[in-house]
Amino acid sequence: MAEPTSAPAHADYETRFPRVTIQFCTQCKWMLRAAYFAQELLSTFSTSLGEVSLQPSTGGTFVVTIHHQPRDQAPRAVSTVLWDRKTDGGFPETKELKRRVRDVIEPGRDLGHVDRHRSAHAASKTAGESSGGADGAGGPAAAAAASGAAMTDTPCEDCK
């Protein structure tokens, strides 16, 4: 029988960058939406991300922040807000959030159909076509519906 060779958990822990933090309002019941975005980021970037964490909050908060170490600067962490519901208006589309993460951690990386769709979408907008719907083709509501997240963009009474 092999002898276990485990060290204390804190000895193996090392802060790995980049890290994404999704801060969400528990009063507004946005945990499923936050978990969906975390799952999508981990599926797309897998080992390129050191961590994706969910951070419960209140007050109608939904903020996605990336903590990273820029390659061209001294080895210290920089925090960049990728999306803030209050300043960016609503929730991001999954593909837009993936683009923003990619632009920080792997700017040259091709995201496949996400990037091709963006080029086609930009071309159709230039041609004067509409993508349909008030918030674009599908929009954040469609992303949340696909994840089974709560479908309300209206803050709870406590968050107003």
Image (cartoon, rainbow, N blue to C red):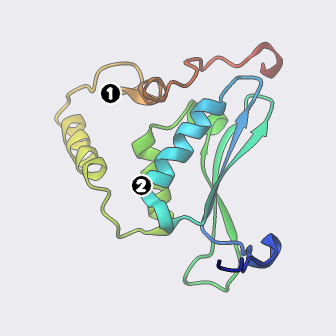
Q: Badge 2: how crowded within 10 Å, few (<14), some, or many (20+)?
A: few
**Residue most extreme to the top:** 157
Question: Tag 1's secondary structure?
Answer: loop
**Residue most extreme to the left:** 127
Mark 2 vs 1, N-terminal side? 2
Position of 140 compared to 21: left or right? left
Q: Quadrant of residue 51?
A: bottom right
**Residue bearing the label numbered 2:** 44
Give the amino acid type for the residue marked by disc 1 in the picture. Ala
- Is residue 52 positioned above or below 2 on the image? above
- Is residue 96 positioned above or below 139 on the image? below
Which residue does the image show at 72% across and 75% down from the upper left? 14
Position of 158 compared to 152: left or right? right
Q: Position of residue 143 (x, y in %)?
A: 44, 30
- Is residue 76 positioned above or below 127 on the image? below
Nearest-to-viewer mark from 2 and 1: 2
Q: Quadrant of residue 58?
A: top right
Pick the quarter of the image with the N terminus.
Answer: bottom right
Q: Quadrant of residue 121?
A: top left
Give the amino acid type for the residue marked by disc 2 in the picture. Thr
**Residue bearing the label numbered 1:** 137
Which residue does the image show at 74% across and 76% down from the upper left? 6
Q: Position of residue 17 (x, y in %)?
A: 62, 70
Question: Tag 2's secondary structure?
Answer: helix
Which residue does the image show at 44% across and 52% down from the upper left? 43
| Front residue of 10 and 102 | 10
Residue 78, disc: none
Q: CA distance from mark 2 to mark 1?
A: 21 Å
